[in-house]
Amino acid sequence: MSSLAAVSASSSAVLSSTSAASNRKPSPPRSRKPPRRPAKKPLLADVRLAAPRHNNDSDAPDRHLLKHYASLASKLAKSGKLRDFLMIAEGVIAAGFAQFVVRIDPRMISEGIVCLLRDGSLAEVVEFASEAERIGLCLASLFDESALEALRLECRRLLDDGRLEQFVELMETLAGYQFTIKDIVDPEYGLSKIIQRGDPELAVRYASVFPHFQLLFCSILEKYGKKQDIVSATKAFEIFKKKSGGLNMFAWRAMIDLCGHCGDFLKSRSIFEELLTKNIMPNIYVLNSLMNVNAHDLSYTFHIYKRMQDLGVTADVTSYNILLKACCNAKRVDLALEVYEEITLMASKGALILDVFTYSTMIKVFADAKMWQMALHIREDMLSAGVVPNIVIWSTLLSACANAGLVDPAIQLFEEMLVTGCEPNAQCCNTLLHACVESCQYDRAFRLFYTWKETGFKICFFDKKLRYYSRVISSGMNNRDGTISSKLTSMQDGGPSLLMVVPFKPTVPTFNILMKACGSDFYRAKALMDEMKTIGLTPNHISWSTLIDSYGAAHNLSGAMQAFRAMQDGGMKLDVAAYTTAIKACVENKNLRVAYSLYEEMKRYQIQPNLVTYNTMLRARDKYGSFVEVQQCLAIYQDMRKSGYRSNDYYLKELIEEWCEGVLCSQCQSHKLPIRDTGNETNSRKCNNLLLEKVALHLRRDIGDRQAIDIRGLTKIEARIVVLSVLRMIKESYLLGKAIQDDMIIITDVVDKGAARTLTSHNLDVQRCIVKVLQEDLSFDLRTGHGALDDPFSKPSTVLRPPEAVKGFKFQARRPQNTGMIKVTKESLLGWLQRKDHRSSPEGSS
């Protein structure tokens, strides 16, 4: 009996288990010897290694049975019974019939796999793949395109359902079976799903199943960089170092680039030092990335450049471009010029080839410094080197001329750009329009805009020879004797030029620039906004703020407020620029009530005012009429100081001084003292800050509280302003019906024995000034000394009689006198407030 016949018994058992033969009556048992079992043979690792069987007449029945069982196994697989298929296949192959693999139908097996995958039996398919690999079947032949598509759908479903661990395990399993994973799933799609979960370890495991593992790891770091998740990126980097041994320069460079994307330049420096600590020599790409990340730090960038030379790494053109970038960021034109001259010399010797980035960076250096002639000189060097200007260079050149206020050279450059075949972008057009507006050439800006809109741009295209001559002709700005187009026409021996009309596509910034050119013509500004909406553009915050400013400049406050509310009703979130512009319109139209209400609305919506907002509010008044107005102004001043802004305190001091001098107006004279200019702006600002803080502190108190005025550290004029401000507040509050409940105390100095010689002389002058104002001008009864306070432990107070009491003061070195307090009694204040000249004075009741 052949070995294949022995397989017949096991296959018959498989068939009997799946048929209805169990209903038949069993045949009576017959006594016979048990059949001889064939000796077990080792399973084949690869069917291609099996020894071929000899083709003779005795093998004919075996070939017939082999064909029969191959067909049977294929039919079982097609019906989804992959386990039964494996049972037959394993038995036949173990019997030494390697031809079984050739006789099975892969298409029918693929249909069975598709059926199971559609039913969601992914685990059974994976188990089948494992067993098929074990018995030596070629899995690639068993999964046709339909089976792979079903497998793709199942993997996609795992990703979309969030079963990422199961998905990665499946990819690792299929990769072990020699499947091409990139044909099953898109690497970037799976990676994005895992990155979104935030599992760096799983991301590295997934990337490891692909042959381009290193590039995928760089993609992992890039995706974490876009999320600003440097912590997860660092974890992934540490896992990758363990897998690769830390010698992969792609990973180090990608990690340094990620630090720059996340703004953590210190982390990039520590990574570089770690690289050197491990005695790993960085290549030029790693060093260039490190320099680029730290390009904002000029000294460190040049330090890395010198370190590069010490390590023996030759700098390339990218290295020098980064050095120029660092000089541009630091606004070091001199240093950038030195680097440029050095690399130009190297380029002349053939050691280096300068690219378009070198010239564009150098042009930007001079453009930012408003050195437009030097920028054009760099363009000549670029053309002589055969480098064609791109749109970035043309845009930078236009900005250089626009920043210098040169409209005509900017327009000439724009025409050259069209002649040389470079299509302008929106930034170039906006730069040219902005130059016209800043130079007050408003009509010219509108003429350019409508000309572009009607005719578009005529772009010239030449053959190689004509294009070369066009670069030579346009290499300088000295084309005064004729236009560039006429010169090119005379040189068209290489073939005719081609013209292509490119339509002009305005953007929202384009309309914003034109709206700014409208000035107070709000009708034209509104028409431009409507035109913007017509072509499908949505006005932004700048558009609405410009429209509000146009209404305000035309003294149309109602229109400005309507535009402000329309901006809010249209779903646009109001920002500080919109509020500031609306407040400015209110101030220009002398409607301070609405201005203050908008300011309070800003604070209520937690929108932080900026410096322009504060200055607009502080300069809203040219004089103060009441105590409430002063309080409003000082509250804004204190908010400004708390926010870290510096204001023009001298202007505010003048207004408060004018207001507080109204206390003396009942005497029909002004005792305003002249203000001395010390010549020291810093000291003057500090004194103004101290004065205004003191005034704000005292004017925020209620009249019912004890009025203790601290004038220590102030000059005579500043102390006078503070005291008169408090008296003005008391008078206005009394006229509103608030009663005086306590005395007014003025603190001039706390005299100490050790400091008596240095402090008493200055403070005595301040005290004399205050006493003179209170006694001579306002006729108050005063008490001086620390005994002026109602303290049972203090010495008896002294009543001063003007002016002998103060003039007769003598300095005693051994026992300084207590002259640190001045008290105005409650009765004296009431007598001053009840005088007829104060009650009837129009300025006293203002």
Image (tube, rainbow, N blue to C red):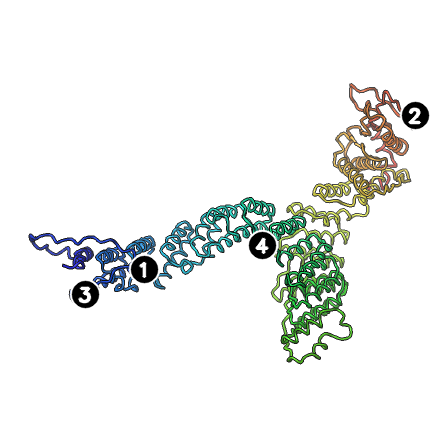
- Which quadrant of the figure has residue 770? top right
Name the disc covering residue 808, or none: 2
**Amino acid type, residue under disc 1 in the picture:** Cys
Q: CA distance from mark 3 to mark 4?
A: 69 Å
Residue nearest the observer in this picture, 760 or 747: 760
Mark 4 and mark 2 lie on one chain; the one further toward the N terminus is 4
- Which quadrant of the figure has residue 463? bottom right
Residue nearest the observer in this picture, 527 or 468: 468
Residue nearest the observer in this picture, 756 or 290: 290
Q: CA distance from mark 3 to mark 2?
A: 142 Å
Mark 4 and mark 1 lie on one chain; the one further toward the N terminus is 1
Mark 1 and mark 3 lie on one chain; the one further toward the N terminus is 3
The spot of residue 594 in percent (x, y) is 72, 50
Mark 3 burial class by Cα count in 10 Å: few <14, some 14-19, many 20+: few
Mark 2 vs 1: CB contact within 8 A: no
Circle 1 residue: 138
Mark 3 vs 4: CB contact within 8 A: no
The spot of residue 590 in percent (x, y) is 77, 51
Residue 517 visible, this angle: no
Q: Secondary structure at mark 3?
A: helix
Q: CA distance from mark 1 to mark 3?
A: 23 Å
Q: Quadrant of the C terminus?
A: top right
Q: CA distance from mark 4 to mark 2?
A: 85 Å
Name the disc covering residue 64, or none: 3
The spot of residue 119 in percent (x, y) is 32, 57
Circle 4 residue: 284
**Amino acid type, residue under disc 4 in the picture:** Ile
User: Is 717 situated above or below 121?
Assistant: above
